[in-house]
Every structure is written in C-alpha cells, then in structure tokens.
Amino acid sequence: MVRCELGTAESADRSSDAGSDRRAYLLGVGAAMSTIAGCTTGTDDDRAPPEEVTPDREPYTLAPGEYDTIAIFRNDDPHPGYRIEALRNLETVFIEANVPVTHGVIPAAPDNAIADDSEFCREFRRRDARYPGLFEYSVHGYTHQIETAFYGGSEFGDRPFETQRELVADGISKVADCVDRRPTTFIPPANTYDEATVRAILEEDLRVVSGGEWFTRQYYGDHELPFEAGGALHVPSTHDVVADWGTLEFLPLEEMKAAFDDVEHLYVCMLHYQHFTTEERIEYLEELVEYVDRDDRVGCMTLESFGRAYLDGTLTELDGGWEYSPE
C-alpha cells in the first residue's frame, strides 16, 4: 500500500480548459502521472477484508421530489500509486457531507494499471461496502496519455473507431474487475472526444459521456444541458475549481459559490483529487460541497444515477428545475 504525506506539490494532471496553458499541461506531464511524489510504502494488514465490511449507513439515494438544480461532483484521475492519501482526504469530505461523487478511474496509467487483487482496488471495494451509493466508478479513458492534437490534445479524438472501441472495452473490463461492478459512464481524458468515441462507448453499452462544456459547445454547437447526440447522453463538466492551468491556482471560493448561484438546472463540478494536498485546499472543498448541498432545492447525484434517471424518465425537466420520481 502507498502512504503519502500532505504536501504542496501540484505537478501532475490533465487540464480541461482550452488555451496554451492547457496544451502545455497536457503535453508536458505524461511521465509524471506514474510518479509517486512524497510517498513511502507500508502495509494495511490491520484492515478488514471486503467480506467482513458492513455498511456504516443506509445506501445513499436522492429523495423523490422537485429540485431547482441537480449537482454532480466529478473527481478525475484515481489510479494506483498516485497520491493515495490525497484521494482518501477527498473521499472523507464527501463521506462526512453524505454527498455522492463520481470517480473517473484511469484503467491503465503507465506502469500503474489497475489490478483487481491490488490494495488500490480492495480499498475501493471496502469503501463502497461501507458507504453504499455514495461512490460511482467511471472509466476515465485508458492510459490517460495524449495521442492526438484533437481540440488541443486528446487520448481518443481523431483515432480509428476500432482502436477506440478496444480501449473502451478493455478499460471497462479493468474497472469492473477492480470495483466488482460494471461502469456505465465514460469520462474522456482532456474532456475531448469525437463521434467515433460515442460509437465506441455505445457498442459497449455505455450511454453517458462527460467531457467539458467548453469542448461540447465547439464540437456539437450551442445546446441546453444535458443533451443527446449520436445516441448517447452528454453530461459535460460545467465548472472547475482551477483558475490557471499553468500555475494550478484555484478560483476564489466566493467566486465558485457565486458561479453556483448563477447555475440553471445542472451543475457538474470537475475536481482532481491530487490538487487537494494542503489543509487549506481540503477546507476549500469542504466549504464548496457544503455550500452546494446547503438546502433541499439542490439534488446531488452521480453521473451514473443522473444518466440512468434521465434516460429512463424518472428525472424530468420542469420550467426552472427538475422532478425526480423513482419507482
């Protein structure tokens, strides 16, 4: 097992915004994704095996009713050997707030592909058993490496359909083996993808894709969120805590709160757990999550639960909000 101390290094990740900083970030950190910063090895023999874990609470479900806004938190990049303590810290924020979160899991990061018998996967399964319904595990690309120059950098865009389908299929298999349930959503690295990507995920029975709103507006044109195109439901990220992808500086918290207040209908906040490496940034996340979930007019869901409810008609749009009527 990997244990990492909190630090201030913020060096390795993928961006989700357009521009020169984003391209430089995407093209310059491939090797860093498989680097462990400030970590030492240890053991977790004192942890109970999955079969001995009992739930700490009732499964998380959104209550039926009407909501002004549906909020989704999307945490990209979990994979073995990379700032695991920061991942635990982020998860603790959502556990304590009882707010669900979608993990975008990288199936095959260089030198750190997930394996179902690894401590990384066992820890996911333990957490899932203790807090049912609180975590979703989405497929976040395959290696998370930039392969083309499509829209400033992409792992999938502009690659042949058969290549994309093979990567999607193997990524699904790896994540499914890791968490003991099949993922139902796809998060493309760099938030970019093309029509072939959509075909590839549909061939593997995934109906929901979450890229970036900046990208979908350029590629698909202006649209209301979410939107359906090519047979898939597109639920792009609408907000990001990072203000500058060159320095990884965060937006001021009050600006994030004001941006949420201006949201109509759907809020999808993209996070990267490896950025939350200081107490100050953990408190930032706590305050943001608490602010979003502060009243009963906001319904919090995962990408998976949102997509399923939207597509099966149990979540319907109203003038100025949503109605959730599960069976």
Image (tube, grey):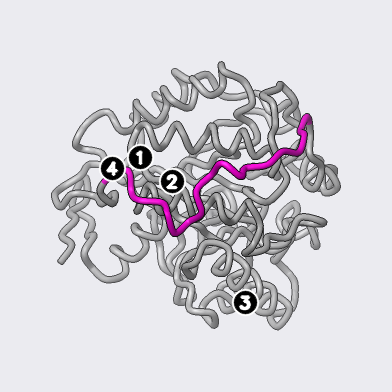
Out of 293 and 253, give the one closest to the viewer.
Answer: 293
Q: Which residue is mark 2?
A: 101
Decide whether residue 41 is among the magenta residues: yes
Kindly identify which residue carries mark 4.
69
- Quadrant holding the N terminus: top right
- How far across and down, in percent of the image, does residue 28 sit? 85, 43
Disc 3 marks a residue whose amino acid type is Ala
N-term-proximal mark, 3 vs 2: 2
Give the x, y percent position of residue 77.
64, 48
Q: Where are the magenta residues, as a range?
A: 38-57
Queried whether the magenta region covers residue 286, the answer comes back as no
- Residue at point 67%, 29% (across, down): 244
Does residue 12 sit above or below 254 in this rendering? Answer: below
Whether residue 228 is visible? yes
Q: Amino acid at mark 2?
A: Val
Tell me the element at label 1. loop
Q: CA distance from mark 1 to mark 2?
A: 7 Å
> Which circle, 4 or 1, is nearer the viewer?
1
**Would you call the spot at circle 2 few (<14 residues within 10 Å), some (14-19), or many (20 or more)?**
many
- Which is more N-terminal, label 4 or label 3? 4
1 and 2 marks in contact (CB < 8 Å): yes
Label 4 near label 3: C-beta < 8 Å? Answer: no
The residue wearing badge 1 is 99
Q: Earlier in the sequence, mark 4 or mark 2?
A: 4
Q: Secondary structure at mark 3?
A: helix
